[in-house]
Every structure is written in structure tokens, then in C-alpha cells.
Amino acid sequence: MTDTPKASFVRDLEFSVRTSNLLSAEGITTRAAFMALDKPTVMGWRNAIGRTWKDIAALQETSRQLAAVWNACTAQDAEMARLHAALELALPVLEAAVSFERAAEDYLTESQYELNAALSDPAATIFVGGNEALKAVRAALEAKP
């Protein structure tokens, strides 16, 4: 036997028999219709009592709270997806930057080695411009972090 949407919706809500019967009798078959109910409407139904409205209002509030949590989770999921996409775009750039930094460090290390070798050659002092220039270059190399 297949449940109709009306029977399934009302049955799935945990209400008193009176409230369930009233919802069925009034044709409340969707969540949207249920959420649109207000106190004057419900209290205008034949056989509705104060508890009928309290049950409906309580479930409407719970439904609103759950919807807010759902929306927050959905927003977080969307933000996480955006961050993941941004990281995927940034990764090759970061890898290239690290590679460039390593190459620059290797180049500086090699250049420092070559300069130190040249500075140890007395003929290099004439080429570079004298001992003062060599001292300044040496001090700059030693000060390198």
C-alpha cells in the first residue's frame, strides 16, 4: 500500500491524535502549508483547542531553528568549497615561489663562493676597486640573513 503525501506528512509529525486529525482534515499536506499556519487560522478550525496551536507553534519553531542550522551548514560548505578552490589555484604559485627561492639561494651561495674566491686573489682588489670596496662587499655578504 502506497502512502499518499497527505497521510505521510501528517503521520510523520509527532502530534496528538486530535492535531494530526485536524491537519489531515484541513488539507495540510506540505511543509510550506504547515509553516504558513497561524494561531487565528488554527483556532478557527472546528475541534481545535489551545494545545492544538501550542503543538503546531512548537514544531514550527523547531523547524525554523533546524532550517537556520541547515542554512548555516550549507553556507559553511560553500565557503569551504571556495577556500578549497582558492588553495588549488594558489598551490602552483606557491610551489613556483618556493622553487624560485631555492634557486635564488643556490645562486647566492654560488656567487658568494665565487666572490670569496676572487677576494682571496690579490689581483681582484685592483679589479673591484681596492681593499675598501672588497671590505664593504665582504661585510654585506656576512650581514646576509
Image (cartoon, rainbow, N blue to C red):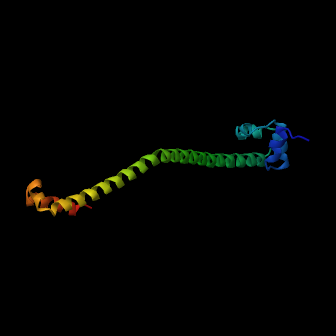
Side of 73 relative to 32 (left or right) = left
Q: Is residue 46 visible?
A: no
Q: Is residue 92 above or below residue 27?
A: below
Assign the C terminus to one quadrant of the image. bottom left
Assign the N terminus to one quadrant of the image. top right
Residue at the spot 60% in from the left edge and 49% down from the top edge = 73
Q: Nearer the viewer, residue 46 or 131?
A: 131
Q: Is residue 117 above or below residue 19?
A: below
Q: Nearer the viewer, residue 137 or 53?
A: 137
- Residue 13 position, x and y percent, is 79, 47
Residue at the spot 82% in from the left edge and 50% down from the top edge = 16
Side of 16 relative to 102 (left or right) = right
- Residue 144 position, x and y percent, is 24, 60
Side of 62 relative to 140 (left or right) = right
- Residue 133 position, x and y percent, is 11, 57
User: Which quadrant of the structure image shows residue 126?
Assistant: bottom left
Q: Is residue 19 above or below residue 102?
A: above
Q: Is residue 5 visible?
A: yes
Farthest residue toward the right?
1
- Residue 28 position, x and y percent, is 79, 37
